[in-house]
Amino acid sequence: MPLTYSLALLALFYVLLVGEFFIPSAGMVGFAAAIAATTSIVIAFTHSATAGFAVTATVVLSTPVVLVMMIRYWPHTAIGKRILNRRPGQLDEPTESRLRSGEKRKDLVGRSGIAKTNLLPSGLVVIDGKRLDAVSDGSPIDAGTEIVVISAVAGKLRVRVAERADLHPEQVDVERRTESIEATLESLDLDELDE
């Protein structure tokens, strides 16, 4: 076979390798790139040993360079920004770490709201009249259920189903004090009866 087939497959390998970053294919484009590279090497070896070793060396030495360049370049592309949902180099704080009102998402911890959609585990919640993306603490939350924010890590709100103590802390505190006083009175009455 002519060496031009090998070089054409080598070019196809690089196109597919770069395409793997831009085409969401669950690795199928990368698999096709590996097949193109392997076939290119085999055809080069059928031409001559020197050509086979040259193509092999080219693939082995240039593949890491292309991958490193793509890893650095890809987050700056439109599709990379959309998939990552953050700016390149941004680790802790996402693009929307503050609400439109200027309030930080971390300030919402402890506040209650309502699940606007089912959280399986992610969905929309309404807190203080604002629709926000949130993730449940692991268990599904039905739409319309009252929720409470338990954390805000990397701009993602984590919520759980609100308990009575979350929604009415003053009332629960009064009930606890009342129960404590009643228990104390009962123990005093029992002590007086024993005398």
Image: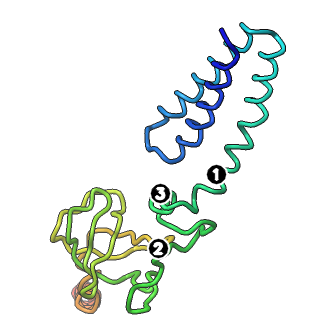
Q: Give, as a three-letter code, the residue at label 3.
A: Ile
Taking 93 as reference, is 80 above or below it? above
Label placed on residue 79: 3
Q: What is the CA distance from the residue labelled 1 to the residue labelled 2? A: 24 Å
The quarter in which the C terminus is drawn is: bottom left
Nearest to the observer: residue 80 or residue 147: 80
Residue beneath the point at 81% across and 22% down: 54
What residue does disc 1 label? 71
Element carrying mark 3: helix
How far across and how far down the image is residue 107, in percent?
Answer: 44, 86
What residue does disc 2 label? 155
Determine the image quadrant of residue 126.
Answer: bottom left
Nearest to the observer: residue 122 or residue 164: 122
Contact check, label 1 and label 2, Cβ < 8 Å: no
Determine the image quadrant of residue 50.
Answer: top right
Local crowd size for mark 2, using a 10 Å CA cut-off: few (<14), some (14–19), many (≥20): many
How far across and how far down the image is residue 144, in percent?
Answer: 15, 71
Q: What is the CA distance from the residue labelled 1 to the residue labelled 3? A: 13 Å
Residue beneath the point at 21% across and 62% down: 118
Q: Earlier in the sequence, mark 2 or mark 3?
A: 3
For discs 1 and 2, the disc positioned in front in the rendered view:
1
Residue furthest out toward the right: 50
